[in-house]
Each structure stands twice: as structure tokens, then as C-alpha cells.
Amino acid sequence: MPCELGLAKEFFDKEIDLLSAHYPGLNWHRFQQELKDLFLRTHYRVGSDSESRAALEEFFSQVRMGVPFEYISNRAYFYRSEFYVNEDVLIPRSETESLVEIAASFLKKSIDKNKVLDLGTGSGCIAISIAMEVGRALEVTASDISDKALEVTRINYFRHQFLMPKKTSFKTIKSDRFSNLEEGFDLIATNPPYIKEKADRGLVHDQVDMHEPHLALYLKEAEYDQWFKELFDSSFKALNPDGILLMEGHENHLSNLAPLAEQSGFNHVKILPDLQGSNRFLQGIKLQR
């Protein structure tokens, strides 16, 4: 490993401008840790100097292209846990952790509410984190339009299922929004695509745009409001009385979407901040009539 670290330091110093563009804030310590972790995880198949050099060159090739470290290592940390990720799912972001906290707080206060839907689950990190956090058995459904994303969800459930309370049920369903879902949920959590494909694209870091799945990122401007109106209508219908919708959204657009949620029937519609204070989440309650 000392030899590899020497070559890595030479590479880092030579390519620092490129690396800084791909990985804002990257320093040698972080780069070194990523490399050490890579070799630790692949030691069983790196058995000679030539294989070690090949693994190192493959790592250099990927970072030259700006492949996120999370995709290189197939791991991302989210809300106290490590999750498997690949290019078929978004990389979990720390700001989304507040969605788990809000959902868990609601469920802890409402002990009769147990049916949870994570709509557009991706890696499954939201659904799985909620199931582990609440402290009692839940009936969790994780849905996504992508078969490949659901494969990632199932891997993560397999790895975390023993950390969930006994009798927790967890199922995955392929569904385009609510096309294959039944009604009767107490909580719907969703981190849908919310970036306008043209208007907002310039605000998206090149690394995200190049490597993360566009299906989970972008919506066309012409269908943006209608897409969310349909989401709110379907969510309201799918919720039990006094159920809650928690949705992550774009800080520039949530204030325009809140009235659409109210038109769908939601009460107590609020826009909530993330840990950095940016408008990040929309909450709506389906009140008992």
C-alpha cells in the first residue's frame, strides 16, 4: 500500500485542478481515505503487484471522469447507516435526512399509524431509515418506476433487515407514481424528481448531471406543475384520514407547489427547512372529515 499511496499522491498533485472541478472541496486526506477504503474492500481479489497497479489505474481512470466516490465504492452514508448505491439510484444527500426525522417524529407520536409508503424509493435509504428509527413494527412499502433501482432497494433491505423491529414488513413494488399501489397509507414520504430540465439545469453540478440517473432528477417545464398536481391528488386519495404527506422539493419552487397541495385537499400545508435552513420539504395533512 505505501507504493500505491506514493503513486496516488503524484496523481493527486498533478491532477488537482481537474479533481477540484469534479469534487469541490476535495483534499489529499479525503482522496487517500477513498483509495485506502477501495483497497481494503478489494484486497481479496488484488493478489499481486500487477493486479494492485491495475486496480489503482482503474481508480485513477474513474476519478478523471468525475465518477462520484460513492459509485466507485458502491457505498453512501445516510442517517446513521451505510447503504449500497450504484449508477441506477441517486446518491443519498445529507439534507434528505431531515425527511426521515420529520417522518419518524410523526410516527412516534401517532402509535396507531403504521403503514408507510416511500414513493420513488431509489436506494431505499428513506424507507429503511424510517423503519429502523421509529422503534416499533411498521408496514413499509417502497416503490419505484425503475426495476434496477428496486434491485438496489432489496440489497439494502437485506443488509439492514435485522436492525428493524421484529414483525416489520417491507415490500417493494414497481410503480409509476401510484399506478400499481393500493390506498390506505398513514404516511407517504417521497423525494421525487423536482429539477426543471432547462431552467434549473445550470444550477446542477456537472458531476451530478453526468453520472446520476436523470429519471430521478429532472422534469420538463411544460409538465412540472401538472405532474405535481397529479402527485398531490393521488397522494391525498391514497392516505388514510389524518395521514401525512412529506415531500422533498426544490427550494425555488415549493412556494408555488404549496397551493396545488391545498387544492388537492391537504390541510396544514407547510414548507419546512433542511438543516442548512433552505426550504426543502412540503408537508400536508389529510384531516379526518
Image (spheres, helix red, strand yellow):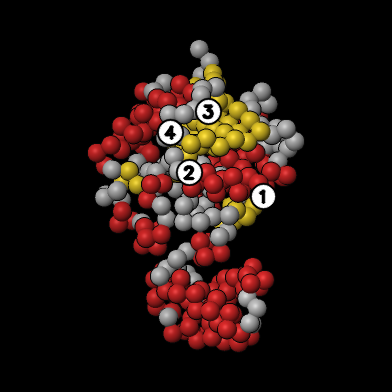
The mark total stands at 4
Dot 3 falls on a residue whose secondary structure is strand
Nearest the eye: 219 or 59: 59
Amino acid under disc 2: Asp
The residue sitting at 59% across, 70% down in the picture is 38
Amino acid under disc 4: Arg
Left or right: residue 232 versus residue 104 is left
Dot 2 falls on a residue whose secondary structure is helix
* Residue 193 higher or lower than 138, as above or below: below
Precedes in sequence: disc 3 or disc 2:
2
* Label of residue 177 in the image: 4
Disc 1/disc 3 C-alpha distance (Å) = 28 Å
> What crowding class fits label 4: few (fewer than 14 Cα within 10 Å), some (14-19), or many (20 or more)?
some
Q: Position of residue 193 (x, y in %)?
A: 39, 43
Disc 3/disc 2 C-alpha distance (Å) = 27 Å
Residue 211 is at least partly visible in this image: yes
The residue that disc 1 covers is 159
Residue furthest right as drawn: 166
Disc 1/disc 2 C-alpha distance (Å) = 19 Å
* Residue 181 higher or lower than 250, as above or below: above
Left or right: residue 102 versus residue 146 is right
Precedes in sequence: disc 1 or disc 4:
1
The residue sitting at 63% across, 45% down in the picture is 157
The residue sitting at 58% across, 59% down in the picture is 75
CB atoms at circles 1 and 4 under 8 Å apart? no
Q: Mark 3 or 2, which is nearer the eye?
A: 2
Left or right: residue 24 versus residue 44 is left
Precedes in sequence: disc 1 or disc 2:
2
* Label of residue 147 in the image: 2
* Label of residue 190 in the image: none
